Structure formats: structure tokens, C-alpha cells
Image: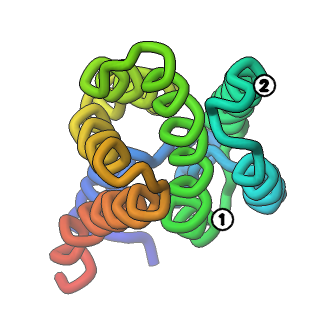
């Protein structure tokens, strides 16, 4: 039996609402509305392994050129990851957003870029603003202007936490919390659809 007009409208409304959710990509090859994220399955372990290696680098003041080179390499890798083909398994997307992205992005942007800018510029607010801008641009490359604008304020908050503590662990935890809220928003908006 074919769905009636009410069911079709409900499915179409849910499809449109979920495809407009920030952080998700609805592909033309996926007419069912399954949400995908731009991260292949094998990239998560590779990112975590390289991030672990990055954490063992010497402090920024010992060899700034090596640290800057590593930061640039990780930034290029991050842009590459964010612009890859979408992954068709939404559960891996959630794992990446809650565990992988906070670690990788905070290591790149806080331990790498912001720490280097702090060393070179000697101005914490300027270093934080430039890092937040780079963070927003990196997100905008894969998810558009709105995603970029919406990540600017959390990026400034993360930079402020790093600036005060000089530790990346609180930034990773806060980043994971921001991503958890980001994931929960579409679920909250979709609740009436599930119960009707």
C-alpha cells in the first residue's frame, strides 16, 4: 500500500528539516533522508594515531619551525578530511563528532596554531581571534557559510579556555560538549515526527 498524502508530506517535511540540520549532508544519492557526515571509516583511527604523535612533539619554544610545519600539515589534513566523500553510516559520524573531531581539531587549532600565534604575536586576544577565524573557515569549507558563522563563537570560547589553562584537555571536553549539543538539536526537533 502506498503512503497517503499526509504520510508523504510528513516524510518530506522531516527530510527537508533534517537535511538543513547544521553538520549534516543530505546527498542526492540518498533519497531516503539518511544523514551522512564527511568522514570515511578508516580516517578516525589514522587521525587519532597522528594526533597522539603530535602530542609528543617538544614544546613550542624549542623548535617553532618544526611545530609550525606540523601544524600546517595537520591543517591541510583536516581540510582534506572535511572535504572527502560522505560516510553513509550515521553512527560513525556521531563517534567522530564526539570523540575524534574534538581531539584532532583542538590539537591542530589550540596546541598547534593558537600556541604558535601566542609565541609569535605575544597577544592572547589576537591569537585567539585568528585561531577562531581559522577554525570557522575550516568548518565553512566543508559545511557552508552558516556552519562557519555558527562555529565562530564556540571557537572563541575554546580559545579562551586554552588561553587561561594552557591545557588542551579542557578544550577537548568542551568541544565534545558543543558537538553533543549540536547533535542533540536535530533530535529534539525531530521528536514530534517520531511520536505523531
Q: Residue at x 24, y 62 (%)?
A: 185
Left or right for 16, reference 134: left
Q: Residue at x 59, y 34 (%)?
A: 112
Q: Position of residue 193 (x, y in %)?
A: 22, 73
| Display colour scheme | rainbow
Of labels 1 and 2, earlier in sequence is 2
Residue 86, compared with residue 189, is above or below; it is: above
Mark number, residue 150: none
Query: Where does the image place residue 76, in percent across and percent down from the top left?
Result: 71, 24
Is residue 103 rendered to the left or right of residue 165? Answer: right
The residue furthest bottom is 195
92 sits to left or right of 144: right
Image quarter (top left, top right, bottom left or bottom right) of the N terminus:
bottom left
Q: CA–CA distance between discs 1 and 2? A: 37 Å
* Figure quadrant of the C terminus: bottom left
Mark 1, residue position:
89
Where does residue 80 sit, x and y in percent of width and height? 71, 29
Asked if residue 40 shows in the view, the reply is no
Query: Do we see residue 193 in this rendering?
Result: yes
Task: Judge by depth and name the residue closer to the eye, 39 or 7.
Answer: 39
Residue 66, labelled with which disc? Answer: 2
State the residue at coordinates (41%, 66%): 173
Task: Check disc 2 and report its element: helix, strand or loop.
Answer: helix
Asked whether 144 or 173 is in front, the reply is: 173
Q: Identify the residue at horizontal 28%, vertical 32% (top origin).
A: 152
| Res. 71 image quadrant | top right
Residue 73 placed where, x, y %?
Answer: 76, 26
Amino acid at each position: 500500500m502506498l503512503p497517503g498524502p499526509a504520510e508523504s508530506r510528513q516524510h518530506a517535511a522531516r527530510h527537508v528539516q533534517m537535511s538543513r540540520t547544521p553538520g549534516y549532508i543530505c546527498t542526492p544519492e540518498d533519497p531516503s533522508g539518511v544523514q551522512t557526515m564527511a568522514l570515511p571509516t578508516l580516517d578516525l583511527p589514522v587521525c587519532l594515531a597522528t594526533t597522539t604523535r603530535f602530542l609528543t612533539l617538544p614544546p613550542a619554544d624549542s623548535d617553532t619551525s618544526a611545530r609550525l610545519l606540523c601544524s600546517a600539515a595537520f591543517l591541510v589534513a583536516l581540510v582534506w578530511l572535511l572535504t572527502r566523500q560522505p560516510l553513509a553510516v550515521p553512527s560513525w559520524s556521531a563517534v567522530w563528532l564526539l570523540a575524534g573531531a574534538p581531539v584532532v581539531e583542538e590539537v591542530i587549532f589550540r596546541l598547534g596554531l593558537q600556541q604558535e600565534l601566542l609565541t609569535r604575536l605575544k597577544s592572547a586576544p589576537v591569537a585567539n581571534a585568528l585561531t577562531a577565524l581559522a577554525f570557522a573557515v575550516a568548518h565553512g569549507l566543508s559545511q557552508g557559510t552558516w556552519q562557519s558563522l555558527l562555529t565562530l563563537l564556540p571557537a572563541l570560547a575554546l580559545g579562551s579556555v586554552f588561553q587561561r589553562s594552557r591545557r588542551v584537555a579542557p578544550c577537548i571536553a568542551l568541544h565534545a560538549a558543543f558537538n553533543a549539543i549540536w547533535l542533540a538539536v536535530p533530535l529534539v526537533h525531530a521528536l514530534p515526527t517520531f511520536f505523531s
